[in-house]
Amino acid sequence: KLFYIMDRTRKWASGLGVVLFIVLRQLTLALEVPLDRKYGSFQLPQPPTITLQSPKDYIFDPRENIVIHCEAKGKPHPSFSWTRNGTHFDVEKDSKVLMKPGSGTLVIDISGEKAEAYEGTYQCTAHNDHGTAVSNNIVIRQSRSPLWSKERNEAIVVQKGISLVLQCRPPAGLPPPVIFWMDNNFQRLPLDKRVSQALNGDLYFSNILPEDTRSDYICYARFPHTQTIQQKQPISVTVLEMGERRPGFMMPLGVTSTKMVLRGETLELECIAEGLPTPEISWQKDGGELPTSRLSYQNFKKTLKISEVNEGDAGDYRCTATNSLGTAHHVIKVTVKAAPFWVSAPRNLILAPNETGILTCRVGGVPKPKINWFVNGVPIENAPEDHSRKVDDDTVILSNVQSGSSAVYQCNASNEFGYLIANAFVNVLAEPPRVLTPPNRVYQVITNSPALLHCASFGSPIPTITWFKDSQTSIKNGDPYVIHENGTLEIHVAQPLNSGKYTCIATNNLGIKENHVYLEVKEPTRILKQPEYKVVQRGMSAVFECKVKHDPTLIPTMTWLKDNGELPDDERFEVDTDSLIIKDITDEDEGTYTCIMNTTLDQDSASAMLTVVEATPTPAIVYEKPDPPTDLELTDQTERSVQLTWIPGDEHNSPTQTFLIQYEDLLHQPGVWVNLTEVAGTSTTAQLNLSPYVYYSFRVLALNQVGYSDPSQPSRQYRTNPAAPDENPSDVQGEGIEPGNLVISWTPLTGFQSNGPGLEYRVQWRQKDVDEDWSSKTVANVSQFVVSGTPTYVLYEIKVQALNDYGNGPEPEVVIGYSGEDLPLSAPDSVQIMVHNSTLAEVHWEPVAAPSVRGKLQGYKRTSCKEDAEQQDQVLTFSGNRSEGRLPGLQPYSLYNLYVKVLNSKGEGPASPSKTFETPEGVPGPPSFLNVLNPSLDALSLEWGPPVNNNGRLAGYTLKYQPVNSTSELGPIKVMTFLANETTITLGNLNSSMLYKFYLSAKTIKGSGPTITEEAFTAMDTAAPSRQVDIATQGWFIGLMCAIALLILVLLIVCFIKRNKGGKYPVKEKEDAHQDPEIQPMKEDDGTFGEYSDTEDHKPLKGSRTPSNGTVRRDESDDSLVDYGEGGDGQFNEDGSFIGQYSGKKEKDTHEGNESSEAPSPVNAMNSFV
């Protein structure tokens, strides 16, 4: 927001001195009414202000809508009107013109209309109850690309070394065309310091050489807005031999010339010299220096450009041409004029009743601009008389203004080179003060820093601001305080004693308003202990300390940097609260380390260097694995234990950490060593727990930091006596696999676990919850037992006990198992179906009784099928003991049969009675296909197929389509509807060479279904930007090439036959007959010249130029015409304009004579020529 200061003086003396006093004191500054709703100020009146308008010169593309911008703000919101060519423009009476709601912006639809009808000078007016603002005069003109005048160029014959100018002289377009020269093969002509193109497009030869001889110097003109390229008739040049020549100037002619340029524009000076050898060009400014910062050279230094010209650039510019035979000079006298430019534009005023203000309109320009004042768009001399208003050239003085005198003033400054117009409102308000700074704002600063406490205010008259500290002490200007004109209180050097509550009070004659803010002065952040310089040996560690003091109310953040960058992402770098630790230092760690302590208000930093040096060499220590232990002995032998002792081997500079003891069971697993236990590296003995019926042999391995030693020599064999088993088989289970059986399985004991010979298993079982004895069976060398003749799916108690020749194992645990299952006997009852919508139903049933399940209940299985479809049944399984389930994914508008079965682990039970239900209609599926047929310049056909799934009675189709421009922006959507039996449509009145996107959906009474899309161009050439297609992969292109090859082969055979017969092939006559591209054969059907047609598969036009061999070669240069386009193939028609894909309809009338008319406008012509 902007705020202003105004002298409170209400009484004015008369005379010039008072006017000067007003100007020097700047009584009023620019001001906007603050639109902050929380203060209610949105209700304050404000005259209109123009915020957006179109440029003064608007050239429009006839293929696009005209959009003339005019936006304004004010309270109340302004209304808008327009004038065209000085008279009122009634927007509502023209159906092609739309004014945007709430805006003055015009959108003119020129499709199907003559665009010339809307050319003219437009001006927008914004009006509300408090004044009227006007826009610039906006000149609207249509872009044009007239045809080249008919002409015939005579062949040029010149001597070597002579200068030469080939004139282009393109038709004057709007905007002017871009010029470039090419040959008959579409290759750009090479330019250098000898051969150059002038600013006017002419081709200049400083000296002509024999290699310049050619018959195809062709000038091309590209018109930017219509994207049309036209060609001039080829010029033939023949060079004869001659000697060297002194320099001279081909352009400009004579010794001096003049040039006028406007301030702020770009100055372009051009010197093209002749001579042999080719002269060198240099520039200088007589009596001054060239502005190097704004200077550039182009066209091999033949063109001097100075950007942003000012008055100091006027003067004499000397162009010098030099070769070995002499020097030539030309002086260009440059004068700088200026269209009006702002020195000080008038700014909005808000005045209180009886106050005085001024509006100043200061402009510069050469010649001096004339200033005219307007009030609400009316010349000030024609406005109602106002005795409080005085006009003095560029100044309007408003004295003792009164309520109701608000208005918008316009200043118009003009000279022969242009004009400026500015709106400035004078708003007369009487408003009590408002403080706009949020209340209770807290300002935090660091001690000894400046503090700014804001008190932004608004009021009319302008409020007076006063400050108080802690609601008591009045603050005056002077150390340490400064009160600025906008009300801000500044403390130059804040100290802790300045902390506290501050109150600002805004006062005028209509009221008073106060606001409170708070200042907190914090302690500065300081590094107390800085990191120190370190010299560290490679492989060692370094610690940098960084101890910091900061204000306790601020949150600090410590950051470390290496060489002003981030620390390496390496775990060797450890950042602590107040230190940095670097471990295992390498040479790459050398550098400068910086600690930075940041708070929300300030920071402090300190740095130190780290230097890495070579480590001092020390004798190498050899570390090896230990030697194996020796002298193993067995003592204290019992039935279940023994003590093993040994003597450790050499540790080889690495202490032994543990000893590993292994055993070999020579009875059950000979040759296999098993880990038994580990003991500490300081022990040399171990008490070993043993198992019965094992033939033990022991060995010991030692472990240090390097690794395990080799095993020791085995101990003597130690055999333990047999005993009854200590454990029973594990993982005992009981499960029937067939009706009437029970399979009992277990994991058998190993030979080591058997504890003796004759290992067997006693299997016992009985039906649970039935008063009967255990059944028992003893088996050996198996891991399962099958019990037959059991009832179907009943619980059994099971246990398995190990025994051998020396007794039984411990009492086994009881395990619960099930006998075999059988198929369920019953089907679910009371099946009912509730249809929720076209794709979802819900089924309910009465669960079957548990005994009839005859197994573990897995759930219920629902099977449904459509009566009129051959597709497979749809099956859903509901797990658990359920009585209902949902049926998703149904086909709308279908009749289904459904039944339910119960499931157990064995299989399915019988099906319930079949239930029939019908789903209601739904939205249809997508159409089966959408094809684009027969695209032409302004029309195409669409064909589609009905949906695979109608999901109801098909009601019809909805087609939407919209254009897509070259930047992939989508245009407006058009919608069409069709009956169910309609599957084709031909769309007309489309834009040519435009990509369209189509959306098609089918519909029933329930609505539209999914949409399918398709894209297509309205022309064969699809070379739109960002949507290029590789033409070599297109089927039509491959077929065309094959046809051409076949035609060439036939022609060669005919030529061969004619030559053998002595006939003559009239090549010369045919070439002579086609030298002039203006002479074209007439079409037989309508008598017009051959034109581009989409049906010709991009064949070259009869009027286009190609080499005599019928091909277009790139030669040695890659700078071809095709390279300057945006892709796609293009040709030139008979009038020389370049044809890609036309956006408009073909012209049936040919243009003859020297008359200029509008050329066709291809969309995809070569946009990139410079």
Image (cartoon, rainbow, N blue to C red):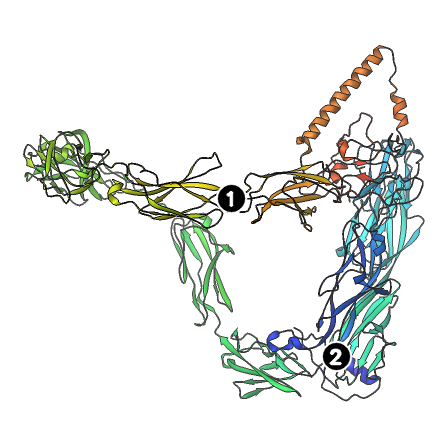
Percent of width and height locating residue 158: 93, 34
CA gap, disc 2 and disc 1: 83 Å
Mark 1 secondary-structure assignment = loop
* Label number found at residue 1105: none
Mark 2 secondary-structure assignment = loop
Height in image: 164 above or below 341?
above
* Label number found at residue 893: 1
User: Does the residue at mark 2 contact the one at mark 1 (Cβ under 8 Å)?
Assistant: no
Q: Which of 95 and 218 is in front in this view?
A: 95
Q: Which of 869 and 1142 is in front in this view?
A: 869
Q: Nearer the viewer, residue 976 or 539?
A: 976
Q: Which tag, 2 or 1, sits closer to the chain's start?
A: 2
* Label number found at residue 26: 2
Mark 1 nearby-residue class (10 Å; few <14, some 14–19, many ≥20): many
The residue that appears at 71% across and 63% down in the rendered structure is 101
Percent of width and height locating residue 173: 85, 48
As shown in the figure, which amino acid type bears the numbered disc 1? Answer: Tyr
The residue that appears at 41% across and 63% down in the rendered structure is 578
| Quadrant the N terminus occupies | bottom right
Whether residue 274 is visible, yes or no, is: yes
As shown in the figure, which amino acid type bears the numbered disc 2? Answer: Gln
Asked if residue 786 lies left or right of residue 249, the reply is left
